[in-house]
Image: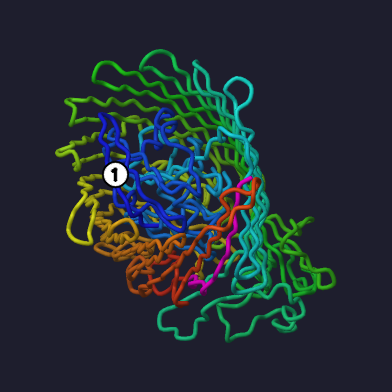
C-alpha cells in the first residue's frame, strides 16, 4: 500500500527510508526509489541489517544501500503479501516501473503461461536466485532450476529484490542479460510462537499456512518449521490447482559468524491452459479453450468415430486435460565467517532435485499426430492402439539433479571495499517425451503420473558444468562519492546425449537424429563500472555500465537449445559459428525524497531512470510447425538476428497527503527494436526496425492508499500498452487496463492466547475486464497465440499469531 509517512536519515554507507505502512498495501515510496539498491541484494552483513517482516507492523522498513550504483529496489514481505496472501514473489514486482508480468491465476503460480518482461528483456533473459542459490532461467519445463514459489513458501519470503538494468557481479546466473530478481527467505524469530493464516475465495480457493518458531535455544540458535496446503479450481474449466510445501530453517549466530541451514519440499500440480490460436484475418477465435475433463462422456462425444475434432474448431480444438506436475527438494548450508575486522568470508553449498512432468491428453487426429503415430504403428488402427477413446496422453518427463558451491571473500582496506567470488555448479538434467494410451474403459486422471508408455519419442541427458568468477572494488573517493568497478568471468561446459533417438519422421522438420556432443563457452572478461554521488542530503545521482552474457540453453529436444536442432550437421555448424547473446547496458538516474509544506501535500519522493542497451547476437526461436507450441513438437529454427537496440525511461513518484492518504504512479517507456533482417534459410525476413514482440512500449501503474481508523484501503491500476505479436510486427494485441482492490482491518483480540488477529479482502480485475493478457510469440508473421484475462475474483484472509 502507498505509505503515508516518510523519514529520511542519512548515514555514511546507507540510509533507511521508514515508510508508514497500511496492512492492506505496499510500502510504495520504496517503489519510487529504484535509483539505488536494497542492501539485501548482496552481502550477508547487508542482509542481517534488514529486520524480519511483520504483517501487522505499523511501519515497514526498506534498506537502501548507497554502495549500489544501479537501479534496484527491495519489496518486503508485507508489500508482497498485501497483493494477495501467498502470491508469487515475481508477481509482486508487477507494480514496479518497467515490469510487465502476466499469468492466468491471481497468485502468479502457473508457470506454463507466465509472461515477464523487464526493460524489453524476457523472463528467460533475467537471472534468479533464492538466498543466493541459483534458480535457473525460469523456462517452463525448466532444466536448470525452479520457480521462486516452489523454492520457498511465499509467506516465508522476507524480501524480493529487482535490479532492473544489471545485477550484482556475484549473482549466480548464466542467463542475466537484463538484470536480476533475488528472493530472500525470512530468518527465524527471536521469540517462540506460532502463526496461522487461512485464505478462502473464488473458485473454491483454500490456502492454509502455519508456522512455528522455536525462539532462542542453545547457544545463539533459533529455527522455524512451516507447512502450506493450497487448493483452487481453474477459473475457466474444472481442474484443480494446488499442492503441499514444507520449509525448515535453522540459524546459529556466534562471534565466529552466522550458520544457516535451509530445507524446502514442494509437491504441486498446476492445470495448464490451452492458448488460443490466431491467424491473420480470422474473426472467430474463441476467448478460452477450456479442457473437457472430468466429463469423459463429453470428451468422447466431441470426436467423430474416427477420432477427428470438429472442423469448425480448426487449430482451437479442445483437449481432455493438461497439467504440470512438479516435486522439488532444495537444501543449502551457508556459513558467513567473521575472519577479522572488516573481513568476511561466506561459503554456501546447495543441492536441488526435481522430478516433473508436463502432461496433456488430446485427440489423436490433430496437429500431425496421425503421421507421428504411423511411424511407430504403420497400417494399424491408431484409435484401437491408443485405447479406443480417440485420445492419447503425451508427457515430457523432467529430472534435475544439481549441486553447487558459492564462495565470496570481502575485505575493507582504507577507502576500498574489495570483493572476490566463485560459483561452481554441476547439473545433470534429462527430458523424455513419451506417449501413453487413454483407455476408453479406464480413463486416467490428470493428477496421476501415467505408466507403461507405448512410445518414447526421444530422451535427452545433459551434463552441464558452470564456473563463474568475479572481482570488484568500491572506492570511496570522498564521503559523498563512490566509484565501483569490477568484472566477472562466465564459463560453461555442456555435454548432451540422446539415449533414445526419435524414429525417422517422429520429429517435425524431417529430423532423423537429434544432435549429440559438447559445447564449451568461455567469456573471461565481462566488465562493470558505476558511481554514486549524493549531491544533496536528499538526492542522489548514479550511473552504471555493465556487460552481461547469456550462456546457451542446455535442454535436449525442445526450446532455444543447440541440442534441439534438426541434425548433427546443424549442431556442428552452430557450435562452430554461433556466439552467446551479450548485452551492454547503460543506466543513469536521479532520485530524491523531500518533506513539504504545500497545503495538503506533506512529502514527495520519486526517481527517474534512463537506460540504453546494445544487445548483440540475439537468438530467435522460430516455431517449426504452423501452430505455435504444437503438441507434436519439433526442432526450432534458431536464427541469429543480429543486434537489438533498446532505449527507455522510468519515471515514478509518490505524493503524500498527511498520514492517511498517498498516491503512487509509475510511467515507463521502452523501445526495443531489431537492428537487422535475418535469413530463415528460404527467404529474407524483414525484422530490421521492428519492435521486439511481446514487450509493450508503454506501461503505467498507480496505487492509491487511504487509512480510515482501523480500516485500510488500497486501489491499484495497471496499464499495459499495445504489444506486437510477430517478429515482423504484422499482427498485434491491444492494450489493457486492470484494477485491484485490497481492504483490511483488525479483529478483536482473544484474551491471552490469540494475538494480532486481522482480516483482509482482495479483489482482482475489479472491473471484470476481458482481453488478451499475454501473447505467445513464435512466428515471423501471420500467426500468434494468446491467453485471456481472468475474470474478477475475490478472496478473504484471516490471520493470527499464537
Where is residue 47, by image quadrant? top left
Rendered position, 135 above or below 729: above
Which x, y percent locates residue 709? 43, 61
Pinpoint residue 230: horizontal percent, then vertical percent.
65, 57
Residue 573: x and y, percent? 42, 46
| Residue lying at 31% horizontally and 46% vertically, measured from the top left | 165
Dot 1: element: strand
Q: Identify residue for label 1.
A: 7
Residue 23 in sight from this viewpoint = yes
Left or right, 206 with respect to 75, comes to right
Give residue 442's quadrant in the image.
Answer: bottom right
* Residue lying farthest to the top in this orientation: 340
Q: Is 501 placed left or right of 599 in the picture?
A: right
Please name the predominant secondary structure of the magenta segment in the image. strand
Badge 1: residue crowd in 10 Å (few <14, some 14–19, many ≥20): some
Q: What span is colored magenta in the figure?
A: 786-802
Q: Residue at 52% x, 19% y: name it.
A: 254
Amino acid at each position: 500500500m502507498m505509505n503515508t509517512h516518510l523519514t529520511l536519515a542519512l548515514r555514511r554507507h546507507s540510509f533507511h527510508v521508514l515508510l508508514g505502512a497500511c496492512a492492506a498495501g505496499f510500502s510504495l515510496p520504496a517503489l519510487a526509489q529504484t535509483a539505488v539498491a536494497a542492501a539485501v541484494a548482496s552481502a550477508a552483513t547487508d542482509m542481517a541489517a534488514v529486520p524480519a517482516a511483520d504483517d501487522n507492523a505499523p511501519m515497514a522498513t526498506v534498506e537502501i544501500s548507497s554502495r549500489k550504483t544501479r537501479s534496484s529496489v527491495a519489496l518486503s514481505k508485507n508489500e508482497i503479501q498485501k497483493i494477495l496472501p501467498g502470491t508469487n514473489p515475481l508477481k509482486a514486482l508487477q507494480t514496479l516501473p518497467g515490469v510487465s508480468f502476466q499469468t492466468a491465476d491471481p497468485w502468479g503460480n502457473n508457470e506454463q503461461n507466465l509472461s515477464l518482461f523487464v526493460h524489453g528483456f524476457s523472463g528467460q533473459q533475467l537471472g534468479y536466485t533464492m538466498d543466493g542459490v541459483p534458480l535457473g532461467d525460469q523456462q517452463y519445463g525448466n532444466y536448470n532450476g525452479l520457480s521462486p514459489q516452489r523454492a520457498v513458501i511465499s509467506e516465508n519470503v522476507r524480501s524480493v529484490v529487482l535490479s532492473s538494468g544489471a545485477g550484482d557481479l556475484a549473482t549466480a546466473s548464466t542467463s542475466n542479460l537484463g538484470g536480476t530478481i533475488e528472493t530472500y527467505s525470512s530468518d527465524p524469530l527471536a521469540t517462540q510462537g506460532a502463526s496461522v493464516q487461512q485464505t478462502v475465495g473464488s473458485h473454491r480457493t483454500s490456502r492454509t499456512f502455519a508456522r512455528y518458531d522455536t525462539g532462542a535455544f542453545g547457544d545463539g540458535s533459533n529455527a522455524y518449521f512451516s507447512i502450506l496446503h493450497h487448493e483452487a479450481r481453474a477459473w475457466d474449466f474444472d481442474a484443480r490447482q494446488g499442492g503441499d510445501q514444507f520449509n525448515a530453517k535453522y540459524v546459529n549466530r556466534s562471534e565466529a559468524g552466522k550458520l544457516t541451514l535451509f530445507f524446502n519440499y514442494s509437491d504441486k500440480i498446476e492445470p495448464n491452459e490451452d492458448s488460443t490460436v490466431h491467424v491473420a484475418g480470422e474473426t472467430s477465435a474463441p476467448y478460452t479453450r477450456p479442457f473437457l475433463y472430468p466429463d469423459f462422456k463429453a470428451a468422447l462425444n466431441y470426436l467423430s468415430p474416427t477420432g477427428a475434432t470438429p472442423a469448425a474448431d480448426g487449430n482451437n480444438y479442445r483437449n481432455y486435460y493438461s497439467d504440470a506436475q512438479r516435486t522439488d527438494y532444495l537444501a543449502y548450508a551457508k556459513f558467513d565467517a567473521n575472519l577479522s575486522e572488516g573481513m568476511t568470508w561466506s561459503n554456501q553449498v546447495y543441492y536441488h532435485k526435481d522430478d516433473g512432468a508436463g502432461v496433456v491428453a488430446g485427440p489423436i487426429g490433430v496437429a500431425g499426430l496421425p503421421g507421428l503415430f504411423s511411424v511407430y504403428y504403420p497400417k494399424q488402427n491408431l484409435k484401437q492402439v491408443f485405447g479406443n477413446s480417440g485420445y492419447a496422453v503425451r508427457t515430457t518427463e523432467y529430472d534435475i539433479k544439481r549441486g553447487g558451491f558459492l564462495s565470496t571473500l570481502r575485505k575493507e582496506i582504507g577507502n576500498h571495499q574489495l570483493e572476490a567470488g566463485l560459483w561452481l555448479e554441476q547439473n545433470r538434467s534429462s527430458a523424455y517425451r513419451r506417449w501413453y494410451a487413454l483407455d476408453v474403459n479406464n480413463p486416467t486422471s490428470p493428477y496421476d503420473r501415467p505408466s507403461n508408455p507405448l512410445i518414447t519419442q526421444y530422451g535427452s541427458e545433459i551434463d552441464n558444468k558452470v564456473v563463474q568468477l568475479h572481482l570488484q572494488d568500491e572506492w570511496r573517493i570522498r564521503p559523498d562519492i563512490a566509484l565501483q568497478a569490477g568484472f566477472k568471468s562466465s564459463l560453461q561446459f555442456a555435454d548432451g546425449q540422446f539415449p533414445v533417438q526419435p524414429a525417422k519422421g517422429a520429429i517435425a522438420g524431417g529430423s532423423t537424429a537429434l544432435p549429440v556432443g559438447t559445447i564449451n563457452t568461455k567469456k573471461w572478461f565481462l566488465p562493470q563500472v558505476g558511481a554514486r554521488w549524493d549531491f544533496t542530503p536528499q538526492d542522489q545521482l548514479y550511473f552504471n555500465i555493465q556487460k552481461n552474457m547469456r550462456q546457451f540453453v542446455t535442454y535436449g529436444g525442445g526450446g532455444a537449445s543447440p541440442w534441439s536442432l534438426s541434425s548433427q550437421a546443424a549442431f556442428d555448424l552452430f557450435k562452430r559459428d554461433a556466439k552467446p547473446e551479450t548485452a551492454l547496458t547503460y543506466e543513469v538516474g536521479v532520485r530524491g525524497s523531500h518533506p513539504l509544506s504545500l497545503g495538503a501535500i506533506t512529502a514527495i519522493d520519486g526517481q527517474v531512470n534512463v537506460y540504453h542497451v546494445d544487445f548483440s547476437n540475439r537468438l530467435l526461436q522460430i516455431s517449426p510447425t504452423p501452430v505455435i507450441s504444437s503438441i507434436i513438437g519439433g526442432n526450432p529454427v534458431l536464427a541469429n538476428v543480429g543486434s537489438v537496440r533498446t532505449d527507455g525511461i522510468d519515471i515514478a513518484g509518490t505524493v503524500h497527503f498527511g498520514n492517511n492518504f498517498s498516491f503512487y504512479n509509475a510511467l515507463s517507456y521502452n523501445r526495443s527494436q531489431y537492428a537487422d533482417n535475418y535469413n530463415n534459410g528460404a527467404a529474407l525476413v524483414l525484422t530490421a526496425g521492428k519492435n521486439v514482440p511481446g514487450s509493450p512500449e508503454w506501461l503505467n501503474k498507480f496505487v492509491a492508499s487511504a487509512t480510515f481508523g482501523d480500516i485500510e484501503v488500497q486501489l491499484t491500476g495497471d496499464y499495459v500498452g499495445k504489444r506486437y505479436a510477430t517478429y515482423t510486427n504484422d499482427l498485434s494485441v491491444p492494450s489493457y487496463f486492470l484494477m485491484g482492490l485490497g481492504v483490511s482491518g483488525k479483529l478483536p483480540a482473544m484474551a491471552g492466547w490469540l494475538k494480532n488477529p486481522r482480516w483482509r479482502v482482495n479483489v482482482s480485475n475489479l472491473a471484470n475486464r476481458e482481453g488478451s493478457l499475454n501473447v505467445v510469440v513464435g512466428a515471423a508473421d501471420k500467426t500468434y497465440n494468446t491467453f485471456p484475462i481472468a475474470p474478477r475474483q475475490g478472496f478473504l484472509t484471516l490471520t493470527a499469531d499464537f
